[in-house]
Image: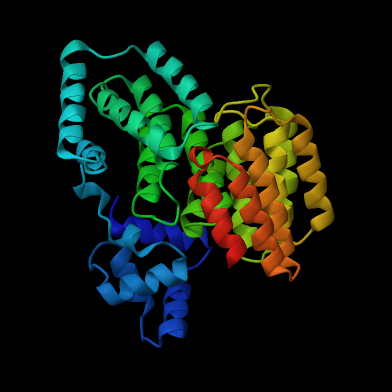
């Protein structure tokens, strides 16, 4: 995707015209940008200078490195190898990939079984362990993409891989979320197209990172299909969180109500998978959202409902709920008490169980 396409998507996600985007930049940076020049950016007639990339990053609320990244110039296998810890690791990944190409690799059914296992492992394993394992899987599946069904598997693996990077580091997390969306489109599978976008939207919205990208992906998911599904539920709740962070309580509450209606039709009985949204997890989403909106009574009710059904095998999510209480304390004016409460909850969780999302919540409470 070109930078012009990205600028247009982010602008349209905010409901802005080209003229409005120019006006916002001019007001914030005292420039004399015209609508026509924005149009030239979007049509790739002109590439924004470093100065204007910074302007766009600020007004569109997207990390600067995302704008600087030209997705079309980066190859799939180079991206995976670039995350390796050492050249020997990259070498092993490449060997694995070419071996898969020569021998056919796992079947589509085997990939679905792998994804189910990763969905369960994600709920309790650390980000570093997941990242190491999934990077190898991505190189293997990359060699099998002549099968459309495997584009769907690849897109879901990419989404999981993106979750191992903090959303604030948009150059990696956002890049992989966007690549996952494009890969799902290649599969032609509507459910995958909605799910990967929705999962990215709730991840970024919950983390409070790259809100412009979260909105774009959520809106795309809702445009693809309004049929109740877990992907659509994630998209709607992601949109609710971005609205809450921006102070738009009306939109946040409207999205929460919509999410609850979707949940009533699409909720899952599976309790311990990243591909599932059971009752307790829906309440975790709502707990943080309501804490951000300052509705302490409703937030506490959501927290109590989540605890009532939260599996004991998932202590990290119990820590999430405690962090939400820390956020409520901080927002009510007791910043020191909120930070201390949240830090105590973090300290009670074994370090190997910590996630990037918990660390970002801690940063939000401190701020």
Q: Residue at x 68, y 27 (%)?
A: 311
Q: Position of residue 249 (x, y in %)?
A: 71, 62
Q: Position of residue 34 (x, y in %)?
A: 36, 80
* Rendering colour mode: rainbow
Any part of residue 121 in sight? yes
> Which of these two is toward me, 270 or 132?
132
> Which of these two is toward me, 260 or 305?
305
Q: Quadrant of the C terminus?
A: bottom right
- Where 335 sits versus 210, above or below? below
Q: Residue at x 34, y 68 (%)?
A: 39
Any part of residue 255 in sight? no
> Which of these two is toward me, 109 or 281?
281
- Left or right position of 285 against 214: right
- Where 262 sits versus 70, above or below? above
Q: Position of residue 206 (x, y in %)?
A: 58, 50
Q: Residue at x 45, y 41 (%)?
A: 163
Q: Position of residue 196 (x, y in %)?
A: 47, 36
* Quarter holding residue 22: bottom left
* Quarter holding residue 225: top right
- Left or right position of 15 against 271: left
- Where 332 sits versus 130, above or below? below
Q: Residue at x 60, y 38 (%)?
A: 316
């Amino acid at each position: 995707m070109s930078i012009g396409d990205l600028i247009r998507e982010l602008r349209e996600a905010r409901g802005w015209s080209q003229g409005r985007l120019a006006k916002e930049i001019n007001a914030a940076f005292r420039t004399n940008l015209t609508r026509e020049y924005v149009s030239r950016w979007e049509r790739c007639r002109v590439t924004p200078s470093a100065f204007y990339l910074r302007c766009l990053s600020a007004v569109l609320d997207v990390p600067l490195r995302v704008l600087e990244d030209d997705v079309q110039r980066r190859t799939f296998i180079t991206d995976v190898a670039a995350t390796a810890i050492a050249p020997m690791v990259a070498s092993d990944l490449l060997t694995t990939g070419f071996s898969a190409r020569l021998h056919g690799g796992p079947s589509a059914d085997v990939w679905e079984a792998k994804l189910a296992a990763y969905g369960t492992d994600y709920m309790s394993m650390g980000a570093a362990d997941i990242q190491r394992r999934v990077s190898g899987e991505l190189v293997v599946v990359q060699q099998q993409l002549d099968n459309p069904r495997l584009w769907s598997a690849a897109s879901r693996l990419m989404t999981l891989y993106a979750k191992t990077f903090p959303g604030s580091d948009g150059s990696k997390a956002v890049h992989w979320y966007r690549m996952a969306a494009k890969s799902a489109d290649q599969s032609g599978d509507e459910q995958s197209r909605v799910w990967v976008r929705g999962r990215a939207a709730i991840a970024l919205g919950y983390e409070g990172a790259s809100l412009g990208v979260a909105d774009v992906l959520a809106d795309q998911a809702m445009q693809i299909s309004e049929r109740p599904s877990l992907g659509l539920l994630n998209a709607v709740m992601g949109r609710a969180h971005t609205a809450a962070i921006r102070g738009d309580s009306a939109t946040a509450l409207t999205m929460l109500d919509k999410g609850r209606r979707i949940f009533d039709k699409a909720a899952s009985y599976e309790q311990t998978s990243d591909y599932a949204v059971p009752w307790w997890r829906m309440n975790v989403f709502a707990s943080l959202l309501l804490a951000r909106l300052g509705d302490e009574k409703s937030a506490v009710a959501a927290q109590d409902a989540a605890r009532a059904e939260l599996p004991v095998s998932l202590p990290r999510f119990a820590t999430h709920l405690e962090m939400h209480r820390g956020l409520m304390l901080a927002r009510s004016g007791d910043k020191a008490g909120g930070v201390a409460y949240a830090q105590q909850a973090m300290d009670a969780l074994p370090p190997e169980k910590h996630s990037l999302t918990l660390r970002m919540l801690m940063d939000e409470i401190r701020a």
